[in-house]
Image (cartoon, rainbow, N blue to C red):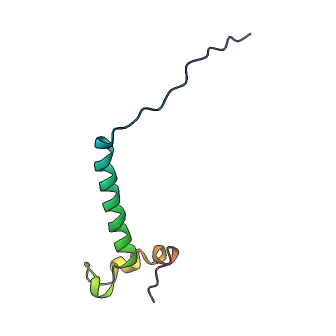
Amino acid sequence: MNQAVLHPAAEPTAIPLRELLPWVIFGGLIMLLAIYFVGAEEGATSIVPGMYVHEFVHDGRHLLGFPCH
């Protein structure tokens, strides 16, 4: 017969807000940049000249509900 050994369950450790806040800000900035490129990178607000970015994110734009035509 096998002897089952029970180990104490691992408890989650609280992450201090000071350590988490820079990552939350960084992630938020990356998300805003992604939303800009998917949703507004064309026409008068374009940072990159040409249609390269528009064509690269074209399907994602429709998937997220942004009109582009």
Q: Residue at x 30, y 55 (%)?
A: 25
Q: Name the spot of residue 20 as percent of width and height, x first.
A: 33, 45
Which residue is at the front of the view, 39 or 12?
12
Q: Name the spot of residue 12 as percent of width and height, x first.
A: 47, 32
Locate residue 16 relative to residue 7 in the image: left or right.
left
Q: Residue at x 28, y 42 (%)?
A: 18
Q: Residue at x 49, y 73 (%)?
A: 64
In the rendered image, the vertical position of residue 12 relative to residue 34, given as above or below: above
Q: Residue furthest front?
A: 17
Q: Residue at x 34, y 56 (%)?
A: 27
Q: Residue furthest bottom?
A: 69
Q: Name the spot of residue 52 as percent of width and height, x first.
A: 34, 79
Q: Quadrant of the C terminus?
A: bottom left
Q: Quadrant of residue 32?
A: bottom left
Which residue is at the front of the view, 27 or 53?
27
Q: Quadrant of residue 1?
A: top right
Locate residue 11 relative to residue 47 in the image: left or right.
right
Count how many numbered circles sit on residues in the image: 0
In the rendered image, the vertical position of residue 20 relative to residue 59, given as above or below: above
Q: Quadrant of residue 50?
A: bottom left
